[in-house]
Amino acid sequence: MTYQPPVRDHAFILRDVLNIDQHGDLPGFSDAPFDVVEQILDAAAQFTGEVLAPLNVVGDKNGCELDPATNTVTTPPGFKDAYKQLCEGGWTGLGSDPAYGGQGLPYVVNLAFSEMSSSANMAFSMYPGLAHGAYSAIHFGGTDEQKQTYLPKMVTGEWTGTMNLTEPHCGTDLGLLRTKAVPQADGSYKITGQKIWISAGEHDMSDNIVHLVLARIEGAPAGVKGISLFIVPKFFPKEDGSVGERNQGVKCVGLEEKMGIHGNATCVMQYDDAVGYLIGEENAGLKIMFVMMNEARLGVGMQGVAQGEAAYQAAVAFAKDRLQGRSLTGPKNADGPADPIIVHPDVRRMLLESKALIEGGRAFLFWTALHGDLSHLHPDEKVREKASDYMGLMTPVLKGYLTDKGFQVCSNAVQVHGGSGFTEHFPVSQFMRDCRIALIYEGTNGVQALDLVGRKLAAKGGRAVMTFFQEIDQFIGENDSDAALKPFIEALSGVKAQLQDGTMWLMQNGLQNPDNAGAASTDYMHLFGLTGLAYMWALMAKAANAKIAAGSSDPFYTTKLTTGRYFIERILPDAASHLSKLKTGSATLMALPAEAF
Amino acid sequence: MTYQPPVRDHAFILRDVLNIDQHGDLPGFSDAPFDVVEQILDAAAQFTGEVLAPLNVVGDKNGCELDPATNTVTTPPGFKDAYKQLCEGGWTGLGSDPAYGGQGLPYVVNLAFSEMSSSANMAFSMYPGLAHGAYSAIHFGGTDEQKQTYLPKMVTGEWTGTMNLTEPHCGTDLGLLRTKAVPQADGSYKITGQKIWISAGEHDMSDNIVHLVLARIEGAPAGVKGISLFIVPKFFPKEDGSVGERNQGVKCVGLEEKMGIHGNATCVMQYDDAVGYLIGEENAGLKIMFVMMNEARLGVGMQGVAQGEAAYQAAVAFAKDRLQGRSLTGPKNADGPADPIIVHPDVRRMLLESKALIEGGRAFLFWTALHGDLSHLHPDEKVREKASDYMGLMTPVLKGYLTDKGFQVCSNAVQVHGGSGFTEHFPVSQFMRDCRIALIYEGTNGVQALDLVGRKLAAKGGRAVMTFFQEIDQFIGENDSDAALKPFIEALSGVKAQLQDGTMWLMQNGLQNPDNAGAASTDYMHLFGLTGLAYMWALMAKAANAKIAAGSSDPFYTTKLTTGRYFIERILPDAASHLSKLKTGSATLMALPAEAF
């Protein structure tokens, strides 16, 4: 069973739910009316399904190899050639600025391609994924010269990029960063320090690797206010755009042994007087890095959905194929030795839970990504502002909630497989192992939850969340006489009230004692995620109903409604549980001294 | 950080909560007053902590190796010697029948040792674990001659054992079994077929391996009514108790590549006219195998707790050691560069959730295991009957609920570690990967849930669950004026009412449409697990309160109460969610045709 990119579901969201053609007068969108997008999705499906997916197991089994003599890394067999095809197909520049050779397509369209890549081969997709993050940071914070030097090569994929934040003693808490930068007479810096867990830090697929490195300029203030960002190229760019000499001070000195994503090189990068170039202002490196980070966080939320989708597909195929036992209501495959296990309610429970989470999560991702486009492109400042507010508010929810749920979906898929799921002869073990990192990197899910309650919720006086509540209220008001939509409206109305209740509790109790906010944060994030999905399911049900009302007999739409009902009946009840937990406060949580654990 | 066996918690449950000394007049218990048990626990802690725990990573990294030329399996370095020490220490016969050289200690005491072994080294502990299962089956169903031939050697550990159920096309559904047995003139049988996923199927640690093999005697009825059980020794036993010739027809032809438990040999066993001996009646093999299976299922529930405990300990050590960020309420380690992450409420949430699930789960296991002892040993038939009812009812709950939660605890531990948790330099990845099999083998958790609602609940007119409700009511009645116990009594009363509600719903709707029972099964199992833990936490709180009232200032008891409050505030709210879900029935779940997934 190979991964089948869910083009139909992508098309449904982009056309029927989000109606991207309504934005046809915006830059990027004007080049991508839905019929063009559909062709792109088909081509993306072909490339990811046929080129990347077959290399997924290869990557897992072979991993990457470091030659300690040369500090070079060899990627798994086939990766290099697949990367060449990725570049030749123009996929690396799909969403990039046309000024530097990109195709300038909307972010939301690019996300559809990224999801397919990640489902097909998460470890592989991280190489261009990190490169695009580095591209974004340079695009946002670089000088014109830096942009001209690096961006065109990164758009074509000839050069890739990395982000270097973590050090052995310093991950979440970047204030502890020690890597130092010493100014040189020529305006460059010499960078010294060790960075760990650098995804795609060294490999054999691109001509050059553009490292973005956080470091502290000698004499800079302590803590996060003294951190600057540097471009440290593996090879120095020459004026003609080719690569010149090796930047001798930067090298990969180790590869992590990991639970998953074996096909991606997770590097220990050693900087010893490596030549670097300041990007942006001194001591303002984090601001630029967070451009990259926010994009990365939404991308990680996407990985949760993507691994979930791939795992779900494998589980469905297994459940239809595996004959074992009989339906509780009498044989459904009387001529065979047993029924396929998809007849069993508890197997369906795992599959439908997965399906409802994936499709709801995908819609939530795409809906947010479209706001990302609008936040840059829309002519109306009010629309840009709202869209920007939403991007800020939803990013930690998407990252935290969708990866928690994506992992659950992968674990469901293992469970559907029974003993086969625990062996490495079936693909689901890898999906689960690969997916597990998504709950951790780019800020653990706990850090996302804290970002949500501690920063995003309160930003601008809570404007973003208030706007979200108003939008939901308006939707409910406009649709509450629609009988076909009734269960979805009721469910949305209920969970929105619960989220408001939780938000109020946080406002009253979190300020008074910050530990209350910390204690509530993960449950609040999940309550928020459930509300987002309830809204998406209402939007999708409305779109499906419209098609059915217009005479469509395509089972896609009735299936969508059933899946949505499953979400309401069997996933949404968790909202009450999260609300109840978050309102218990921090007293019990903080009562024990450390030694009592 | 090495695993520290939780002797203190074991002692608390055995002495203060279960008061095992009250059974001091029963066989087995008379040899094990609590002070003796305490010495056994200390010795067990020393052996498992010092001998088995250091080999856990070794087993994961090295795995087992099959020599295809000789069909022999080499276990990881150190395993063979550790097994020798296990035997020399008498640990293999701890709970075995003195008639065959065992020490005859209570099952509940044996379970404490098994938990420590499994925490220290799950893959290793499965070798003696499977052997004990095979011992139990022969003890239950073998002839006197078979018992005399095999049991003494299995008690000393010189011989180990296996259980051979699964075939490539047949796991849960044993009715599809194809392995055949042909009667021979001498009363033996020739066994032919392939068995897969045979844990400890071949290895280098014991002198002989006693395979228990399910097969179909030629001409037997189709389905589960035609399955017999056979003893197939690797080497034929000689009259003097030594091993004789090799049983040429049985050999290991493959090892599974797995997500975890690499130190255990998961074998493909090929039987080609292997000589086997019928155990028990023809066509009644499943009855004996289920003796082995039920013991194994409780043991798997224990593995969930055991891996959780080991992972939790690693997470606590990391959380105390890792300095990152500052407490939300101001520095707690002002002289250091940052605070230990255990100051953060969300880290504590993961740790306390883990602690509350492990300690509650352990108590539930021990409480049930004590009923296992009483079901055999108590002179009062009424007590035996009730205990036996409980064993039947609780076994699927313990297996399913405690492994689901054990895996969640292991995943929490990975999360507390952040990026370190995803690498193989820290132990938690292995705990999570090893633990994952516990949700699958000995019947997937979905099968457990179905066993619970489809068989155990209805057995004898629902007598077991009614007795359980009465016991809880009585406990509530006896303690509802105890102010110190109030939150625990209220919580128990609430969840018991929810479980009754769910039980009533199942009785009304499950009979009418079996798919309703199947659809409700997993949520019902979790609701049952939560009720069991709420009862255990009430029992533990009562015991802790008694110690405090008697003047103890040991923080162990106040910590116990805080952990119990955490359970009530932040775990028990899931009960309402499970109840709500299970009452939605099967309509939505069964609505979609297979092709709609």
Image (tube, coloured by chain):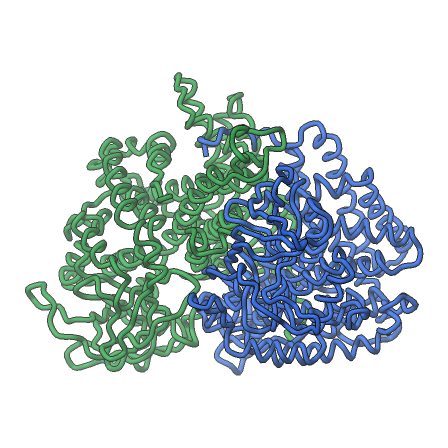
Chain colours: A blue, B green
Q: Where residue A8 sits in the image (x, y, percent)?
A: 74, 74
Looking at the image, which is closer to me, B496 or A371? A371
Q: Is residue B355 above or below residue A440?
A: above
In the depicted structure, whether residue B339 falls above or below residue B483 = below
Q: Quadrant of residue B374?
A: top left
Viewer-nearest residue: A139 or B453 = A139
> Which quadrant is home to the C terminus of chain B?
bottom right
Q: Is residue B64 left or right of residue A552?
A: left
Q: Residue furthest front?
A: A185
The residue furthest top is B551
Q: Quadrant of the N terminus of chain B?
A: top left
Left or right for B414, reference A503: left
Q: Residue at x 48, y 54 (%)?
A: B452
Q: Residue at x 29, y 72 (%)?
A: B66
Is any part of residue B172 visible from this angle?
no
Name above or below for residue A529 compared with residue A139: above
| Residue placed most toward the observer, A431 or A444 | A444
- Image coordinates of residue B218 in percent, x first then y, are 30, 81
Front position in the image: A172 or A450: A172
Q: Could you tell me residue B566's position as x and y percent?
A: 54, 34
Number of disc labels: 0
* Above or below, A40 relative to B573: below
Q: Is residue A495 visible?
A: yes
Residue plotted at (35% across, 74% down) = B226
- Residue A350 is situated, as x and y percent measured from the top left of the image, at 59, 62
A198 left or right, relative to A88: left
